[in-house]
Image (tube, grey):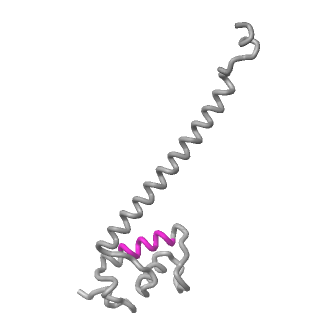
Amino acid sequence: MIDAISLLPVYDHSQIDSRHRLVIATSQRAKHLMQGARPLGQSKYAKATSIALDEMLHQKVVFLTGKEAQKAIKEAKRGKDSEMERIAVAATREDAREIKKELTVYVDDSPKPAEAKEE
């Protein structure tokens, strides 16, 4: 069986150590391109998957592996969790203001000046 990766025009074994890693990293990059990311430089291809593969093979995309990747994932999750907490707190404050505003229209618990003088 012929190794398909060895047939590709540019292939650095130090960065891409297996076909599996090439496919995973390329698919992730293609996903980013389809979501609106800009290509890293000019490409002769039009489809996102072809552009992503070209970028991977020409080492335009840097990706992490091993412990560095695990550390980056943990940091990203922490950032996402703190952002979600901030959004939740802001939404809670806004909801409380809206409820208070709506209740002041229907319920007025403040003593009226005329009632205070009669007692």
Q: Nearer the viewer, residue 9 or 56?
A: 56
Q: Position of residue 63 (x, y in %)?
A: 39, 77
Q: In this view, does 95 lie above or below 32?
A: above
Left or right of residue 91: residue 108? right
Q: Where is residue 82 in the image (x, y as percent from the top left)?
A: 45, 55
Give the quarter of the image for residue 109.
Answer: top right
Give the quarter of the image for residue 56.
Answer: bottom left
Please name the residue shown 55% across and 46% down the image.
90
In the rendered picture of this protein, how many numbered marks are placed on residues? 0
Give the quadrant of the C terminus.
Answer: top right
Question: Which SS type dominates the magenta stretch?
Answer: helix
Q: Which of 112 and 118 is in front in this view?
A: 118
Give the quadrant of the N terminus.
Answer: bottom left
Please name the residue shown 57% across and 38% down the image.
95
Left or right of residue 29: residue 74? left
Residue lying furthest top in this view? 119
Please name the residue shown 69% across and 26% down the image.
105
Q: Where is residue 50 in the image (x, y as percent from the top left)?
A: 46, 80
Residue lying furthest right in this view? 114
Q: Is residue 21 above or below residue 101?
A: below
Q: Where is residue 118 in the image (x, y as percent from the top left)?
A: 73, 7
Q: Is residue 12 above or below residue 69?
A: below
Give the quarter of the image for residue 80.
Answer: bottom left
Please name the residue shown 62% across and 36% down the image.
98
Q: Magenta segment range? A: 24-33
**Residue 27 drawn in magenta:** yes
**Residue 7 drawn in magenta:** no
Q: Nearer the viewer, residue 31 or 47?
A: 31
Q: In this view, does 15 lie above or below 71?
A: below
